[in-house]
Amino acid sequence: MARLFFGMNQSLDGFVDYQGLGMPSPKLFEHFIEQTRGLAGSLYGRRLYEIMRYWDDDQPGWEVAENEFAMAWRNTPKWVVSRTLETVGPNAKLLGDDVEGDIRKLKTEVDGQIEVGGPDLARSLTDWGLIDEYRIYLHPVVLGHGNPFFARPRPPLHLAGSDRIDDDVILLTYVPG
């Protein structure tokens, strides 16, 4: 059975604006490469999937780490929730009209961890009780804008762990309950 986790970089004031937080440090990026290599799959909302499609094509000037992440991302099965997309890229599947049913089926048919990408999608999955873990990569930055990590009031959570990833980022892991 799959375990779904929602994890994103977050500012001190609760926002996940990827442009405001900038590129991850080399150590944090290595963490994301290893995490992506170990995934059973990724589940994306349309907006974040379209941003992540950047990794489908090699880019001039990439360093070794960018190539490693791109390979890990390309090799990871992806499922995309969208009412507007008609097609998705390689190694990706567009989910049907019964999103909740499709994701419940994924949880029973897939073994391993499935990453949930995007706060709006995570909100729906939280409402349906489908997220098993929340991972907040807390950055010492105040943005004052962006998408909130929790798109609705935070569900009841318990701290399950904390890890210092680099000099500035702490991973906070929470579970529902």
Image: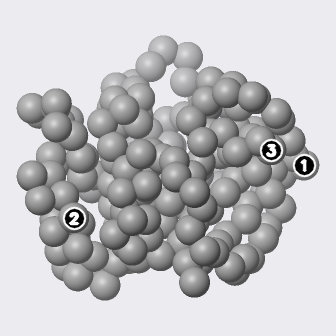
Q: Which residue is mark 2?
A: 100
Relative to 60, say whether 53 is above or below.
below
> Which residue occupies the foreground of this view, 83 or 156?
156
Q: Residue at x 34, y 78 (%)?
A: 2
Lower position in the chain sequence, tag 3 or tag 2: 3
State left or right for residue 123 relative to residue 150: left
Q: Which residue is mark 3?
A: 12
Q: Can residue 159 be seen by looking at this rendering?
A: yes
Residue 35 at what x, y percent from top left?
54, 60
Q: Which residue is mark 1?
A: 167
SS at mark 3 in the image: loop
Quadrant position of residue 45 = top left
Disc 3 residue type?
Leu
* Residues at discs 3 and 2 in contact (Cβ within 8 Å): no
Q: Quadrant of the C terminus?
A: bottom right
SS at mark 1 in the image: loop
Q: Residue at x 48, y 15 (%)?
A: 60
Alpha carbons under labels 3 and 2: distance apart: 31 Å
Callout in the foreground (3, 1): 3
Disc 2 residue type?
Glu
State left or right for residue 106 relative to residue 135: left
Residue 26 at what x, y percent from top left?
73, 41
Alpha carbons under labels 2 and 1: distance apart: 39 Å
Residue 148 at what x, y percent from top left?
60, 42
Residue 142 at what x, y percent from top left?
82, 33
Q: Can residue 113 be seen by looking at this rendering?
A: no
Alpha carbons under labels 3 and 1: distance apart: 15 Å
Lower position in the chain sequence, tag 2 or tag 1: 2
Disc 1 residue type?
Asp
Quadrant position of residue 84 = top left
Colouring used for the render: one colour
**Mark 1 Cα shell of 10 Å, populated few (<14), some (14-19), many (≥20):** few
